[in-house]
Image (cartoon, rainbow, N blue to C red):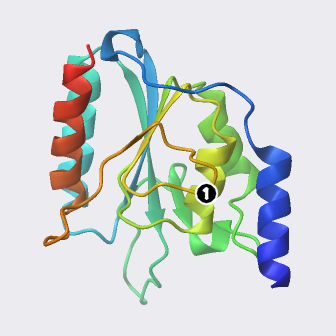
Amino acid sequence: MLKEFFQRQSIRKSASTEPTGMMPLRAIHSAVAFIDVEDTSFNECKNALMSFFRDWGIKGDIFFIDFRKLTEGERLITSITTTILKKDLNWYGRPSREKINLMLEGEPDMFLSLLPETNFALEFMAHSSRARFKVGRAQLEGDVFDLVVRDPADKKLSELEAFHGIEKILEKIV
């Protein structure tokens, strides 16, 4: 209960007031995407995102969510700079100021979350992002995302499959 209170206060204090809405792909010049390294397709998804950004002339940054407990000898497989680890979270789940500032300094036009479920770290980043177009797979409280692409009722999609579906929709909003 106390944790949820601090989470709500933190979001209220840091939430962007930038108006958001659907944007044509040709008007998007920068983007930030979030993917989960625990998804088996994360590497292919990262490559697909980079290719998509390149094809559309979008300066894209990819952030990784990695809350796994690494065993001895196991190494981080993503850049430490753009990876949000469990140790980067405070006691109630807010990412470190360094990670927040890194996301905000890119001033992205589009915020894209490919995580199938939300956690507080992602929710905080989505609320605080000043992106003018926000896309996700699960709507957040306050209707943060302008476009939500859910998994079919009978199947759980990988991040790569979800991205290909989102990509098709985005390419129709040219």
Q: Residue at x 55, y 25 (%)?
A: 132
Q: Residue at x 57, y 45 (%)?
A: 144
Q: Quadrant of the N terminus?
A: bottom right
Q: Is residue 91 left or right of residue 145?
A: right
Q: Is residue 50 left or right of residue 96?
A: left
Return the residue found at the far bottom.
72
Res 60 seen here? yes
The image position of residue 90, as x and y in percent, is 76, 71
- The image quarter containing residue 41 is bottom left
Q: Is residue 90 above or below residue 141?
A: below
Q: Is residue 57 above or below residue 36?
A: above
Q: Is residue 46 left or right of residue 95?
A: left
Q: Amino acid at mark 1?
A: Glu
In this rendering, the count of numbered labels is: 1
Q: Is residue 83 above or below residue 62?
A: below
| Mark 1 nearby-residue class (10 Å; few <14, some 14–19, many ≥20) | few
Q: Is residue 23 left or right of residue 165?
A: right
Res 91 seen here? no
Return the residue found at the far top.
26
Q: Nearer the viewer, residue 7 or 37?
A: 7
Q: Which residue is mark 1?
A: 141
Q: Residue at x 26, y 13 (%)?
A: 174
Q: Residue at x 62, y 66 (%)?
A: 120
The image position of residue 159, as x and y in percent, is 25, 57
The image position of residue 40, as x and y in percent, is 20, 69
The image position of residue 71, as x and y in percent, is 42, 89
Secondary structure beneath disc 1? loop
- The image quarter containing residue 77 is bottom left
